[in-house]
Each structure stands twice: as C-alpha cells, then as structure tokens.
Image: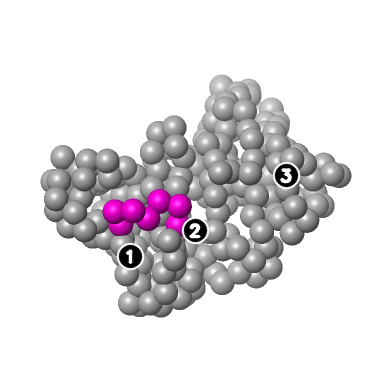
C-alpha cells in the first residue's frame, strides 16, 4: 500500500514561530504536493515539487516555502506563523504522469492552530 | 477557479444507488474527468477517472455524456461508509496538479 505520512496530526504554535510540516512517501513518487483546506474554500494548492530540489508555486504560496532535499520527503515551512495560517494541511504524492492517469495519494493531514 | 460545478449536497438511502452529477461544460479535448472523495477527518481518496468512455472499477462507475459536458458518478449500492464529500475534477493529461472545487456532500441514510 502507498503510504504518505505527515509528522503530526495536530500542532499548536504561536504567532511568529517558524513551523515545519514534514511529509514522507514510501512509493518513490516523483511528484509531491502541499494543500491547505479551510471550511467553505475546499483544498487549495500551496506548492508542489516534481523532482528533488525542484519546486513550483501553487495557487496560494504567500507566507510559505518548501524544501525537497530527498525524493521521499517534502517539507512545508511557515517562516513566521500567523493566525490566518490556522488550517488543515494535506500532503500528497503521485508518479510522474502517465498520460491521462495521475492518481494523487494523500496523507492524513496536519491540523495546525496558530495562536 | 474550478472548471466543474456540483450541487452542494445530496442524500440517498443505504443500499440504493447514489448518482452524483457534475457539470464541466468548458472541458477541452485533452482534459480528463477525475473523481475523488474525502471522508471526514481523512485525506482525499481517488475513485475513478475517464476521458470520454464510461468507466467502471470496484468502487464506482463513471458515465460521461457524449458531448463530455457533464458526467455522473454512480455508487451502485451506497453504504453508510460512503458518506463523504465527492470532488469532480477536470485535469489536462500532462498536468500533475489537481484543482479541487467545493465538492458535493453525500449523506447516506440508514
């Protein structure tokens, strides 16, 4: 079974703290993604990576950065956490696309609260 | 913006078929229709995808109209565990990204 794991299920941080969210996948997938999910707004793509050390901005990258030093690990970084970054964060991975088929496998999510 | 529109919610009785509609009137020839679902407190899960032919797997069937402007996801015998938010997504073949809309909340009642 494909496994995407995230470092924490719940996290509470203070405004201004630097926050690291870690994601690890065990299926040798090239692509990895970070989303956030908020009530009424659905899932929104923050950043994604299609290879080691490669990254591309998604729809809402402001206030976030990412790091992909190893193929299996993709980190989301909040340089200075703010209360509007309180959200559910979801990581996903997928193979480099076969035409027409590119299933994303999601982790369980990290619920981050910034006080 | 998501390229699909779905009703916000629907319900069905346990054991009956659940037919979830999706409109994608601006779909282009190289775009696939994908369905994912998200059970409460879990990450989304892939269900099925198709281009223009109808598709079936162990979870569901996907019916795409001939003009490809709409589709229906069919859960043939809904169970309580199928209660979830279902996302219909249109994606170009070469694009790894998915754009999720708000989805449709399916409630299966006993």
Residue topped by disc 3: B26
Residue B105 spot, x, y in % from top left: 54, 30
Q: Quadrant of the C terminus of chain A?
A: top left
Main SS, magenta region, reads loop
Q: Residue at x 37, y 55 (%)?
A: A61
Label 2 to label 1: alpha-carbon separation? 19 Å
Label number found at residue A66: 1
Residue range of the region highlighted in magenta in the rendering: A58-64
Label 2 to label 3: alpha-carbon separation? 27 Å
Residue topped by disc 2: A105
A63 drawn magenta: yes
Residue B18 spot, x, y in % from top left: 67, 31
Q: Would residue B61 be seen by someone viewing this image from the given angle?
A: no
Residue B86 spot, x, y in % from top left: 57, 39
Can marks 1 and 3 be said to lie on one chain?
Answer: no
Q: Identify the image quadrant of residue B24.
A: top right
Q: Residue at x 40, y 51 (%)?
A: A60
């Amino acid at each position: 079974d494909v496994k995407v794991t995230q470092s924490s299920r719940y996290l509470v941080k203070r405004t201004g703290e630097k926050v690291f969210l870690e994601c690890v996948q065990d299926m040798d997938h090239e692509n990895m993604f970070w989303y956030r999910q908020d009530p009424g707004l659905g899932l929104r793509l923050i950043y994604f990576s299609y290879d080691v050390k490669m990254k591309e901005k998604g729809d809402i990258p402001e206030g976030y950065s990412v790091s992909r030093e190893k193929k299996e690990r993709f980190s989301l970084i909040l340089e200075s956490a703010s209360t509007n970054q309180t959200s559910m964060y979801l990581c996903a991975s997928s193979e480099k696309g076969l035409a027409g088929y590119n299933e994303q496998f999601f982790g369980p999510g990290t619920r981050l609260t910034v006080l | 913006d998501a390229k699909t529109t779905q009703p916000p919610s629907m319900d069905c009785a346990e054991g009956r078929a659940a037919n979830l509609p999706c409109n994608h009137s601006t779909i282009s020839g190289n775009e696939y229709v994908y369905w994912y679902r998200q059970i409460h407190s879990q990450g989304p899960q892939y269900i099925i995808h198709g281009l223009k032919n109808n598709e079936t797997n162990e979870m569901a069937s996907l019916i795409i109209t001939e003009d490809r402007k709409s589709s229906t996801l069919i859960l043939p015998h809904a169970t309580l565990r199928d209660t979830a938010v279902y996302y219909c997504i249109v994606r170009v073949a070469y694009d790894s990204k998915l754009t999720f809309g708000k989805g449709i909340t399916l409630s299966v009642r006993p």
